[in-house]
């Protein structure tokens, strides 16, 4: 059995956030619903939702009035990155900022998008990628950590990342 990780909200402090994926543990304002959307999630009335893209795409077809802060797309190192078209569709559906995070099966945060939306900051040494995929320049958010460059096509960086992910 592995240790569950605490979900990290992109811009602290976290509002009431529903994490619809396994591998995370609940905390004060973050509740984990590993089985996806349910009546319990609706009763929780999250201001933000974190989930894999396919689940968010399904949820985008229904109104969720409590979501007023953000949507966080949870991707994996071997899956495709969030495309500009995916981001636009989620924006039109939820009308809140969209963030992307790459996590492993244990809920460990490997890379995360900040409020500048200019790539994903590398958060773990467990994620390695082709040096061409990194942007070493300081981010507009003020952090100096290297970032994965923004994805330009759905599979652009995913191929590079999966080839180097440990």
Image (cartoon, rainbow, N blue to C red):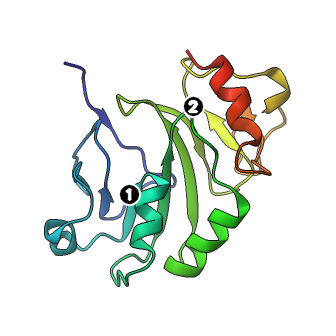
Q: In which quarter of the image is the N terminus?
A: top left
Residue under the image location 57 percent in, 57 percent down: 99
CB of mark 1 within 8 Å of CB of mark 2? Answer: no
Residue in the foreground of this view, choosing between 64 and 139: 64
Q: Quadrant of residue 86?
A: bottom right
Residue under the image location 63 percent in, 26 percent down: 162
Q: In this rendering, does residue 145 appear at all?
A: no
Q: In this view, does 141 lie above or below 22?
A: below
Q: In this rendering, does residue 45 appear at all?
A: yes
Return the residue at label 2: 78
Q: In which quarter of the image is the C terminus?
A: top right
Task: Answer left or right for 140 relative to 23.
Answer: right
**Element under disc 2:** loop
Return the residue at label 1: 14
Q: In this view, does 95 lie above or below 52?
A: below
Q: In which quarter of the image is residue 56?
A: bottom left
Task: Answer left or right for 90 relative to 69.
Answer: right
Task: Answer left or right for 21 relative to 163.
Answer: left
Residue 65's disc number: none
Q: Cα distance, mark 1 to mark 2?
A: 27 Å
Task: Answer left or right for 9 relative to 46.
Answer: right
Q: In which quarter of the image is residue 42?
A: bottom left
**Element under disc 1:** loop
């Amino acid at each position: 059995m592995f240790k569950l990780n605490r979900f990290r909200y992109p811009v602290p402090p976290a509002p009431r956030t529903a994490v619809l994926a396994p591998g995370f543990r609940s905390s004060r304002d973050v509740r984990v619903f590993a089985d996806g959307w349910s009546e319990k999630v609706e009763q929780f009335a999250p201001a933000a939702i974190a989930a894999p893209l396919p689940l968010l795409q399904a949820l985008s077809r229904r109104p969720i009035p409590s979501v007023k802060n953000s949507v966080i797309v949870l991707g994996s190192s071997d899956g495709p990155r969030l495309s500009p078209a995916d981001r636009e569709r989620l924006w039109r559906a939820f009308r809140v900022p969209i963030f992307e995070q790459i996590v492993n099966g244990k809920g460990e945060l490997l890379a995360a998008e900040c409020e500048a939306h200019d790539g994903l900051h590398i958060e773990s040494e467990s994620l390695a990628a082709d040096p061409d995929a990194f942007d070493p320049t300081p981010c507009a958010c003020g952090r100096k950590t290297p970032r994965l460059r923004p994805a330009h096509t759905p599979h652009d960086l995913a191929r590079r990342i999966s080839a180097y992910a440990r």
